[in-house]
């Protein structure tokens, strides 16, 4: 088990003391505690691999933090890694669909950030929801919703460092020799190459991914094609300090070293000191009775009266890291799939296997109360909605898209204030129903882990939500606790540091 970071707020153990209940309620609580402890022991729920992860105070994560927040890595200097992944926003951006380049305000993050085209407000061009960067070092098999960065020989506890890694720069199942030390480093090579996320549409137009990366490295290193592109540039000194080297910029400020530093910053975000973990460690008062009942449902099979969530959400990260057809509503511009070109076939885009059409990687449930909206397209805006989708996917799709007012989209915070919200994403119904048909076919064939005809009462739904909320580390809700991962204004290396503000202009 990973120890708490030295900057973490101390966990306050709350005891019932003289407020403890007596009689039947007390007996019921004790029996529930015993049931959960038996489940913990029988299923090995507290058995986690040891991991070698950095501390935010280390030199490389400190360099990575500054790189993560600089707009110098955006092709047009109007976006940064943090644009879609701010610690205060749950390691994401609180948007259903991200807005990367050409926004209304490059420093405004979260609600109120709008994509601009020809000086007019337009819908987001990024086709998927931004996953959280919290606990990136816990993933061992793959990253991205479709696992387009994946370990070819996954070893538990290594973050993919124990073998070859495949990336979008190589064919499926072919190792990328430039992937870096681990999955997180491999992932850090790609946001800068996406036109919609960071690259823009004029910077290194029609160039290869490597050309884009080399140009950005030269910009920071102030050499070659990037010479004098930054008015203020102290990056060489920063790299020399972090890598303990006096080497030249050409040799030291490379994109491999940039990605490695960003990865170490992301891997330092260890936020797994949540109330459920404290319960597993012996503090029986760490979670509410409702959450305990939710935990029992979560870890118990449907045929035994449970919800069976653990079938896919297991381990320290609460994910099997595998791919499943869940049939969440599909909104957004899509990935060019289907007859309309607005659909998203998910894992199928990587494997080409029919069984993988509409399958996406199982999301982690750690810190889930702050990492919404949920699903690959951000179409689920709260946890109750997510839970109810699993009970009845058909009804969930019907409630979202199968009505003339398209109110599912209008209920999403990012779009609800739009005058024409009911008329956007007109293909949402057909695309969502195609995914639903795939799920139903797999359920009928017995190849789906999404349980058919799951029966849960409103109270049980509320209990499950209470348990899910108990998987959130208190630190991720506390700006002071998160401060080590957010650079202050004085830490800017190039006068391009993104000092984020919210829709009201207040600092994040």
Image: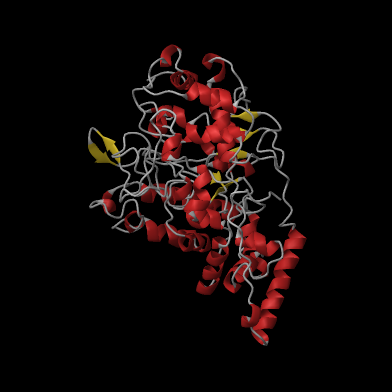
Q: Nearer the viewer, residue 429 or 373?
A: 373
The residue that appears at 28% across and 39% down in the rendered structure is 104
At x 66%, y 62%, the residue is 278
Residue 52 image offset from top left, x and y in percent: 69, 40
Left or right placement of residue 417 versus residue 200 in this view = left
Image location of residue 341, percent across then percent down:
38, 37
- In this rendering, does residue 75 appear at all? yes
Q: Is residue 422 above or below residue 349?
A: below
Q: Nearer the viewer, residue 267 or 35?
A: 267
How many circles with numbers are drawn on the protein?
A: 0
Q: Position of residue 202 (x, y in %)?
A: 34, 23
The answer to whether residue 305 is left or right of residue 81 is right
**Residue at the far bottom in the pictured view:** 23
Work out whether 387 lies above or below 102.
below
Instruction: Name the quadrant containing residue 160.
Output: top right
Residue at the front extreme?
490
Say if 322 sits above or below 410 in the image.
above
What's the colour scheme? secondary structure
- Horizontally, residue 69 falls left or right of residue 52, namely left
- Residue 180 point in image, percent of width and height: 61, 27
Q: Residue at x 68, y 69 (%)?
A: 284
Can you see residue 337?
A: no
Q: Nearer the viewer, residue 294 or 63?
A: 63
The residue at the far right in this view is 42
Q: Is residue 29 left or right of residue 462?
A: right
């Amino acid at each position: 088990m990973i120890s708490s970071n030295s900057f973490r707020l101390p966990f306050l153990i709350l005891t019932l003391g003289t407020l403890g209940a007596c009689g039947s309620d007390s007996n019921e609580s004790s029996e529930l505690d015993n049931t959960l402890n038996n489940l913990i022991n029988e299923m090995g729920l507290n058995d986690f691999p040891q991991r070698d992860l950095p501390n935010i105070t280390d030199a490389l994560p400190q360099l990575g933090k500054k790189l993560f927040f600089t707009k110098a890595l955006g092709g047009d200097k109007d976006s940064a890694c943090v644009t879609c992944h701010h610690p205060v926003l749950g390691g994401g951006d609180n948007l259903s669909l991200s807005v990367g380049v050409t926004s209304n305000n490059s420093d405004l993050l979260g609600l109120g950030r709008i994509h601009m085209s020809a000086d007019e407000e337009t819908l987001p061009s990024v086709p998927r929801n931004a996953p959280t960067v919290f606990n990136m070092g816990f993933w061992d098999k793959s990253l991205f919703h479709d696992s387009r960065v994946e370990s070819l020989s996954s070893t538990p506890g290594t973050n993919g460092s124990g073998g070859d890694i495949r990336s979008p720069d190589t064919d499926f199942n072919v190792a990328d020799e430039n992937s870096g030390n681990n999955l997180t480093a491999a992932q850090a090579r790609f946001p800068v190459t996406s036109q919609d996320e960071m690259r823009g549409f004029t910077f290194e137009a029609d160039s290869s991914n490597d050309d884009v990366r080399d140009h950005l490295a030269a910009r920071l290193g102030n050499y070659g094609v990037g010479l004098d592109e930054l008015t203020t540039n102290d990056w060489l000194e920063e790299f020399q300090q972090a890598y303990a080297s006096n080497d030249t910029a050409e040799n030291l400020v490379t994109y491999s070293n940039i990605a490695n530093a960003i990865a170490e910053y992301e891997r330092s975000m260890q936020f797994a000191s949540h109330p459920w973990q404290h319960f597993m460690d012996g503090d029986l008062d760490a979670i509410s009775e409702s959450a305990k009942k939710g935990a029992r449902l979560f870890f118990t099979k449907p045929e035994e009266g449970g919800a069976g969530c653990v079938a896919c959400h297991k381990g320290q990260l609460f994910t099997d890291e595998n791919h499943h057809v869940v049939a969440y509503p599909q909104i957004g511009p899509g990935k060019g799939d289907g007859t309309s070109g607005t659909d998203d076939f998910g894992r199928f885009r990587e494997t080409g296997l029919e069984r993988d059409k509409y399958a996406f990687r199982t999301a982690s449930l750690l810190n889930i109360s702050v990492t919404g909206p949920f699903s690959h397209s951000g179409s689920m805006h709260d946890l109750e909605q997510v839970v109810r989708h699993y009970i009845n996917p058909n009804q969930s799709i019907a409630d979202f898209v199968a009505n003339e007012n398209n109110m599912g989209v209008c209920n999403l915070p990012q779009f609800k204030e739009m005058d024409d919200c009911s008329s956007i994403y007109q293909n949402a119904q057909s695309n969502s129903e195609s995914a639903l048909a795939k799920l139903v076919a797999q359920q009928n064939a017995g190849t789906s882990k999404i349980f058919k005809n799951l029966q849960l009462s409103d109270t049980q739904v509320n209990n499950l939500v209470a348990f899910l909320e108990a998987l959130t580390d208190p630190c991720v809700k506390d700006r002071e606790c998160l401060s080590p991962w957010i650079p202050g204004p004085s830490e800017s290396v190039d006068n391009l540091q993104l000092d984020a503000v919210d829709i009201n202009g207040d600092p994040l």
